[in-house]
Amino acid sequence: MGLPGSGKSTIGRHLARLWKLRFVDTDHVIEQRLGCSIKAFFAAQGEVAFRDIESQVLAELLQQDQVCVLSTGGGAILRAQNREVLKARSTVFYLQSLPEDIARRLRNDTTRPLMQGDDPLKRLHTLLQERGPLYLETAHYAIDAARQNASQVSRKICMQAELAGLLPGHGICNAIED
Ligand SMILES: Nc1ncnc2c1ncn2[C@@H]1O[C@H](COP(=O)(O)OP(=O)(O)O)[C@@H](O)[C@H]1O
Ligand SMILES: O=C(O)C1=C[C@@H](OP(=O)(O)O)[C@@H](O)[C@H](O)C1
Ligand SMILES: [Mg+2]
């Protein structure tokens, strides 16, 4: 988990491929269920309706017993119910990114409804202020992702997962190329 644009979807997909696990992105599941984009749904039904579906999808996915890599949307930690189920049913990695890095990355992105205002950098700082404590409260591991490319962040998560005994420990992290 982490702020929008912190790399959850990209890095999650990469690690799932490396670890030969199923990859699930809650936003992708939500879009399939809705039959439209999250942006369109936000515009038509508003954020609360989106959060309701997000909580439902998250609870369903975390009920399953098959091990997978799960990337959430950046706001999944806003509800206490989601934080509780994430903490209880998964190992949570928080990608601790700098708003400045993210604003640069997302400057041409028009798909994220919360990032479409005049000042995305200011928005990211506000989101970090509001959500930072919630990310930290929910995470089992905080990964310093500041000024790191996606491979560097993937390697850090992989090494932490290996140390935590979540991986067999056969040097699989060395396979991540820059
Ligand atoms: N650490 C990183 N360094 C550079 N670019 C990144 C990094 N993480 C993600 N990106 C790029 O930033 C964009 C947003 O990443 P994404 O995985 O969609 O973030 P999230 O799912 O957290 O919102 C993508 O174009 C991705 O390739
Ligand atoms: O931060 C948020 O509240 C959101 C982040 C988005 O996912 P990403 O974090 O993958 O951009 C998506 O779930 C939705 O637009 C709301
Ligand atoms: Mg994503």
Image: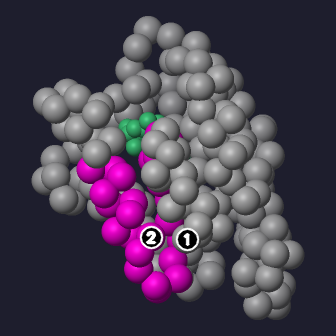
12 over 137 or under it: above or below: below
Q: Label 2's element? A: helix
Q: How many numbered marks appear?
A: 2
| Residue 162 is inside the magenta segment | no
Mark 1 near mark 2, Cβ–Cβ under 8 Å? yes
Reading the image, the residue beneath label 1 is 89
Residue beneath the point at 73% across and 84% down? 167
The yes-or-no answer for disc 2 within 8 Å of ligand 2 is no
Q: Label 1's element? A: helix
Q: Which amino acid is tagged 1?
A: Arg
Whole-percent x, y for residue 157 in the image: 74, 63
- Circle 2: is it few (<14), some (14-19), or many (20+) Cα within 10 Å? some
- Circle 1: is it few (<14), some (14-19), or many (20+) Cα within 10 Å? some
Pick the front one: 149 or 170: 170
Q: In which quadrant is the C terminus drawn? A: bottom right
Side of 46 where 70 appears, left or right: right
Visible in this render: residue 124? Answer: no
* Cα separation between marks 1 and 2: 6 Å
Residue beneath the point at 80% across and 82% down? 165
The image quadrant that residue 90 belongs to is bottom right
Where are the magenta residues, as a range?
Answer: 53-76
Mark number for residue 62? 2
Whole-percent x, y for residue 110 in the image: 35, 29
The image quadrant that residue 172 belongs to is bottom right
Q: Which badge, 1 or 2, is on the more N-terminal residue?
A: 2
Whole-percent x, y for residue 98 in the image: 71, 31
| Residue 69 is inside the magenta segment | yes
Side of 101 where 12 appears, left or right: left
Side of 80 where 40 appears, left or right: left
The image quadrant that residue 92 belongs to is bottom right
Whole-percent x, y for residue 60 in the image: 34, 68
